[in-house]
Image (cartoon, helix red, strand yellow):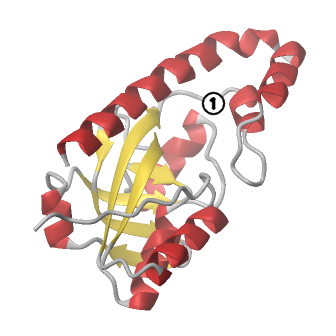
Amino acid sequence: MPVSMHVIAGGGLPAGARAAAEALVLHGVSALMSFGLAGGLDPALTPGMLAVPRRVISAAGTWATDRALTETCGGATAEALFAGETIVATATEKAALHAQTGAAAIDLESGEVAAVAARHGLPFVVVRAICDPAGRDLPPAALAALNSAGVIGLGRVLASLLRAPRQLPLLLALARDASAARRALADFAAGF
């Protein structure tokens, strides 16, 4: 029997992920998946690698992902993913968070998806592609890119570049890494 899937984008921020997950629950889904990009905390993870964790940890709690769903997604590739509230931008901050939590990656949405799944008694899984590696700082233009709704604003990026043009090489590296991550997600989705 074919599996029916429903997709709602959360906008890359915790509140959007929570709203999207709750909307999916109202639609009657039987499981939730947090799918998208993540920042690397483990230096061994390179852009485009998939992080499929066994658990999601955050300041609010820890949630185990569903074993059967994880196996359906190719099996766990990481022990934990950290659900952050804000972007962790520097290699120093990433290293400290990795040492503190043991998490391999960080995103801003999976904690909310996990919490919604727990509230409704649903299984969940996380599939995230590494976009920015642990050893690289994010350029200021990347931090200025998203607004509070998770929408990328080209004007904000260009304004940041005009103020600090030396960040262009880092921004171009991030664009290449994001492209590798999106390809990995597309390849995963095509085979799912």
Q: Residue 130's x, y, as percent?
A: 40, 38
Q: Residue at x 58, y 38 (%)?
A: 92
Measured from the top left, where is residue 76 in percent x and y?
19, 56
Report which residue position mark 1 lands on: 138
**Vertical arrangement, residue 39 with respect to residue 3, above or below:** above
Q: Does the image show residue 22? A: yes
Say left or right for 146 vs 52: right
In the image, 179 versus 174, the foreground residue is: 179
Residue at (55, 68) in percent of width and height: 20
Q: Quadrant of residue 166?
A: top right
- 59 on left or right of 151: left
CA neighbours of label 1 inside 10 A, class few (<14), some (14 to 19), many (20+):
many
Please state which of residues 91 and 160 is positioned toward the viewer in this rendering. Answer: 160
Residue shown at 59% from the left, 14% from the top: 172
What SS does tag 1 mark?
A: loop
Q: Position of residue 54 (x, y in %)?
A: 26, 64
Query: Which amino acid type is shown beneath numbered disc 1?
Result: Leu
Outermost left residue: 1
Question: Could you say which is closer to the camera, residue 153 or residue 91?
Answer: 153
Of residues 28 and 49, the one nearer the viewer is 28
Residue 36 vs 155, above or below: the answer is: below
Q: How many discs appear?
A: 1
- Above or below residue 84? Residue 176 is above
Measured as percent of width and height from the top left, residue 36 is found at 44, 47
Residue at screen point 78% across, 46% down: 147
Residue 47 in sight: no
**Quadrant placement of the N terminus:** bottom left
Residue 129 higher or lower than 167, as above or below: below
